[in-house]
Amino acid sequence: MTRWLTDDEQHAWRTFGLATRLLTDRLERDLLAAADMPPTYYELLVLLSEAPRRTMRMSELAHWTNSKPSRISHAVNKLEQKGWVRREHYADDRRGWLAVLTDDGLAALRAAAPRHVAGVREHLIDLLTPEQLRQLADISQVLLDHLTEQDRAAGRVEP
Amino acid sequence: MTRWLTDDEQHAWRTFGLATRLLTDRLERDLLAAADMPPTYYELLVLLSEAPRRTMRMSELAHWTNSKPSRISHAVNKLEQKGWVRREHYADDRRGWLAVLTDDGLAALRAAAPRHVAGVREHLIDLLTPEQLRQLADISQVLLDHLTEQDRAAGRVEP
DNA sequence: TAGGTTTATTTCAGTGCGCAACTATCAAGT
DNA sequence: ACTTGATAGTTGCGCACTGAAATAAACCTA
């Protein structure tokens, strides 16, 4: 027997679901239009740009984007073709590979960033009061803790 | 010159973005596993189930899922193959078509719903206090108003 | 050094989507 | 009535993304 949602819960869920979908659609469209950069790529470039030596192992990329290895392999192939990323052997374990963000890649990211930030401001940040922004961060943190905890319990990631 | 995000803003945005992505991924995976129903289909079935006579015009479906006509056409083809939806002429304008949710379709939806609701509870609703739920609804409403207002200003929908 | 495990790649197939071309219908003007 | 133009929807084609499975290479342990 199911615990159905109350009207308030239903309303919250629907509004939330629709709003987030529209928001992400919008940001992705804008990013693609402005920088010819699929959202998938952007995420990977950001991860690399913030990593030490602008470098990450393939498996790390897979972990933080929680995706299968093959997906990363495909994506890095594309990024390598564009000249934004290059592969390097991982010295300590020669099965492994490192993805390194090139200067061109960093430049592309820097070129795309302002538009993206402007979009985030326009469609999210600047719409909310500081109070609401704090609330949103708190709520998101709860969800995040829960979802990553789930993954951990399922034995999918390191502690 | 770009107004970059402050640390607080950055944190809110990242947490929010990641949390929503993980949440939707999770719910979609569960739904697919439990009901063999792609999230895309589910959305359409829900829309139809709540419409008068369980019926909607193709263009309405396109509007409320904000997607291109062709996408709806393809999707309804699939749903029709499954026997969950049937097409009917629209009497008042014979260019138009109605998508009608069949009894089988309603049954499939009813079968999938409990799992889905349980997931929404487990990964969202039950994690938050009533206060937080209200905050989330308010915030989402702000985003929603803004984004649909944008669409309207761009002349994409009726008032 | 044999056997099992881990890391990553590649091939292949499936999916979902949009664009462009097309058909059919309607609505307006002449 | 007849043309013209707009609207509703479909279809075919190609593209991009993803995952499953098979493979190869390096590693680890007994």
Image (tube, coloured by chain):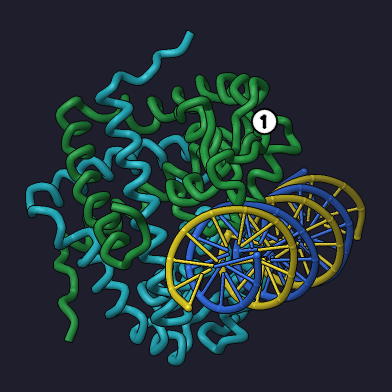
Chain colours: A cyan, B green, C yellow, D blue
Image coordinates of residue B99 in percent, x first then y, are: 60, 38
Image label count:
1
Q: Quadrant of residue A107?
A: bottom left
Q: What's the residue at 28%, 52% (across, down)?
A: B159
Image coordinates of residue B124 in percent, x first then y, are: 34, 32
Secondary structure type for disc 1: loop
Camera-side residue: C20 or A105?
C20
Does residue B34 appear left or right of residue A133 in this picture? right
Does residue B95 appear left or right of residue B1 in this picture? right
Q: What is the chain identity of the residue bearing mark 1?
A: B
Q: Is residue B4 visible?
A: yes
Camera-side residue: B113 or B126?
B113
Check disc 1 and give the amino acid type. Trp
Which residue bears the numbered disc 1?
B84
Camera-side residue: B105 or B35?
B105
Camera-side residue: A136 or A86?
A136
Mark 1 Cα within 10 Å, few/some/many (few <14, many 20+)? many
Examine the rendered structure and indicate whether residue B74 appears above or below residue B111. below
Q: Quadrant of residue A119?
A: bottom left
Q: What's the residue at 39%, 51% (across, down)?
A: A21
Does residue C25 appear left or right of residue B116 in this picture? right
Examine the rendered structure and indicate whether residue A131 appears above or below residue B10. above
Does residue C10 appear left or right of residue B23 in this picture? right
Image coordinates of residue B156 in percent, x first then y, are: 37, 62
The quarter of the image holding the C terminus of chain A is top left
